[in-house]
Structures are given as structure tokens and as C-alpha cells.
Amino acid sequence: MKVILTQDVPKLGKMGEMKVVADGYATNYLIPKKLAVPAAGGAYRQWLHDIAAREEKRRREREEAEITARRIESTTLTMGVKVGEAGKLYGSITAKDIADALGRRGIVVDRHKIELEEPLKALGTYKVAIKVYPGMTPEVTVVVEPKG
């Protein structure tokens, strides 16, 4: 029997996928627990419509991510920090600091998407990768220099 999954089902598939399963599995488990609906008539047409809508949404998200990636790659962040003797920083530059600096420039990025192994603790120029979309990881240039 063909069914369309209405929720993720372990070892079977993700929500929105059409699967062919045994009749008993569908009628005795999936459909009563509202994990799936039969792939017939209106449900099948709705499923086809949903596929088109998801593809359109993914295309739009990818276009927006490409624009954001180009803006990130063309951005250089200059971070002024207090420096002690021998060029040691007081504190460090974290992913949150980088996200805040990008936000002030109109580029909204979740700090968890910034690939920073450990905080920047020395003066210099760094390339920091940011995940904006699967397979799309532009790098922002961060210049750490003494303040004042």
C-alpha cells in the first residue's frame, strides 16, 4: 500500500515522503497512529502540491543564502581590543562578538553557525568560516588590532 508520511517514522522515512509499505503495517499501525495517510485521491494531489511548494521554498532560501554569502565574503571586520604587554589581549574575540559585528553591518548570522575552533586571543588577521546554507561556507576576514 502506498502511504504519505505525516510525521518522521524511524527506519521508514521523513515527513512528506511517499512510501510503499505492507497493507497490515499501514492499516494497523501507521494510519491509526496518524503517522501516515493513504496515498490516494486528494491526499496524493496535496502531496504533489507540497513537493512543488517545498522546492520553491528551498530555491528561495538558497538564493537568499547566496546573497548573504557574497556579503560575508566581501566584509572585513576590524575588532579593536585592549592589549597588554607583549601583545597579549585582555579577553578574546568569540563567535558571539563576530556575530554582533556582522549584525551591526546588517548581516544577521546565528553565532552557532560561525566555525571558530577557539576564541581569537592574539593580534592579526584571521579568516573565519560561516555556515549559511548546506554546502555554502563563506569566510569573513577578521582583523584584530589594538584599540586606540
Image (cartoon, grey):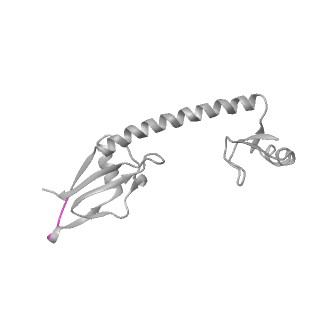
Residue range highlighted in magenta: 81-85
Does residue 140 lie above or below 38 as drawn? Answer: below
Magenta stretch prevailing secondary structure = loop
Does residue 116 lie above or below 27 as drawn? Answer: below
Tally the numbered discs: 0
- The residue under the point 79% across, 32% down is 40
Q: Position of residue 79 (x, y in %)?
A: 23, 54
Query: Residue most toward the bottom?
Result: 86
Residue 18, by quadrant, is: top right
- The residue under the point 22% across, 66% down is 90
Q: Is residue 6 magenta?
A: no
Does residue 94 lie above or below 23 as drawn? Answer: below
Query: Residue most toward the front?
Result: 135
Q: Position of residue 147 (x, y in %)?
A: 16, 57
Q: Position of residue 142 (x, y in %)?
A: 26, 54
- The residue under the point 46% across, 45% down is 133
Relative to 36, 103 lies left or right:
left
